[in-house]
Amino acid sequence: MYPNDSINSWFDGQGHWSDVPANKWNDWKWQLRNRLTTLDHLENFLDLTPEERKGALLADKKLALAITPYFFNLIDPNDPDDPIRRQVVPRVEETRTAPEELLDPVGEEGTSPVPGIVHRYPDRVLFLVTDRCAAYCRYCTRSRLVSNAQDYNFHPEYESGLRYIRSHPEIRDVLLSGGDPLLLSDQKLDHLLGELRKIPHVEFIRIGSRIPVFLPQRITPALADIFRKHGPIWMSIHVNHPNECTIALSAACEQLSFAGVPLGNQSVLLRGVNDDAETMRALLHRLLMMRVRPYYLYQCDLITGSAHLRVDPRKGIEIIRALRGHTTGYAIPQFVIDAPGGGGKVPINPDYIQEITDEAVIMRNFQGEEYRYPLISGAVGATPEVQPFHA
């Protein structure tokens, strides 16, 4: 299905927009201006299912519809179950709420001391700097906020956020998110990163972005220079399926890497997209080929209207078990559930440890074979006796 796990070159052209001059196609602002944002736009290129047509009509009640021409070209128009299509084309199921679903599934509102800042963990904050994205993932955790379809009326307040960070010396790690921070202008990003770099206790600056995936044209030499100037700036991108790993994305990742930006990937486990080991392995291998380290595999949050995309968490554990021992450790992400209500990320792993006795750890490897590792005698944490060395 995925021969040699190669980078996706099956469709890296302009497709439906073949008549557009290359200089426009490669202009990220042209891509934004020409996004597909209405039912009519979609029906120009796709035969929509009844569920999709109803979803597109109702999208502005939950989360706006927007797909860049570049990313839309990755959809197989003849496959109603295409994994790219499932991520960005609205469906009527989004309007149905299951009892366990929440508007704020990971409890950000309860840990937001000032608008735009989420301070859940002791030494780090989430800094929400925009409510806009290049395209909208239909399972978005912040669909209450992103695109303002629900009249949340979030307005980024950079200065109040910066004041909060400056006044809390325990904050050593700042994650810029939103929306997508890379939609800010070069000037705003330069200013924001510069102000963060002036704060003595801020050691670690990260950006969470799907722009390289939705809009690789945004990764320009000028943007790379900004990251180089304020670096190291760490970045987590968001790729869910091997077909998203295109030549254009690979080039964008290379440009970021050469600018000194360490890259990680955060995927969300989604039904019909990446919920089998073969697809996940192909994705992880392609990421490594693009200089991107797989970081997290998230269980889909309990956001309202996401039941049709969520997978039983046991499937995620099964996928991790199928990867361990069958690919390099660099390729294996940490499977996590962001605990509903604000508990933070909880690692979920296969059970390799069978038992811990007074004498040994009893464990099984990836093949199911049992092994024993002896414990140090005495109390937990005791230091073993060391014999003196004689020359």
Image (cartoon, rainbow, N blue to C red):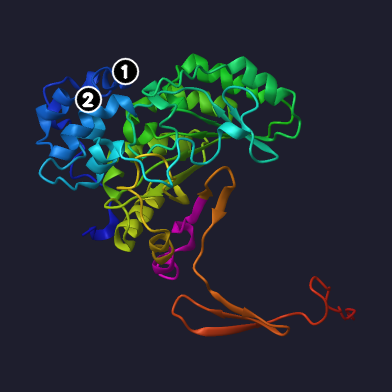
Give the amino acid at mark 2.
Leu
Q: Secondary structure at mark 1?
A: helix
**On the image, numbered disc 1 is attached to which residue?**
29
Give the amino acid at mark 1.
Lys
Q: Position of residue 332 (x, y in %)?
A: 46, 59
Horizontal side of residue 366 vs 10, given as left or right:
right
Query: Residue at image x 39%, y 68%?
Result: 322
Horizontal side of residue 43 vs 243, given as left or right:
left
Q: Specify the segment rendered in magenta.
A: 320-337
Nearer the observer, 285 or 356? 356
Q: Secondary structure at mark 2?
A: loop
Number of other residues with Cα within 10 Å of mark 1, as a class: few under 14, some 14 to 19, many 20 or more: some
Q: Position of residue 145 (x, y in %)?
A: 44, 26
Can you name the residue that lies furthest to the front here?
99
User: Which of marks 1 and 2 precedes in the sequence?
Assistant: 1
Nearer the observer, 182 or 125? 125
**On the image, numbered disc 2 is attached to which residue?**
36
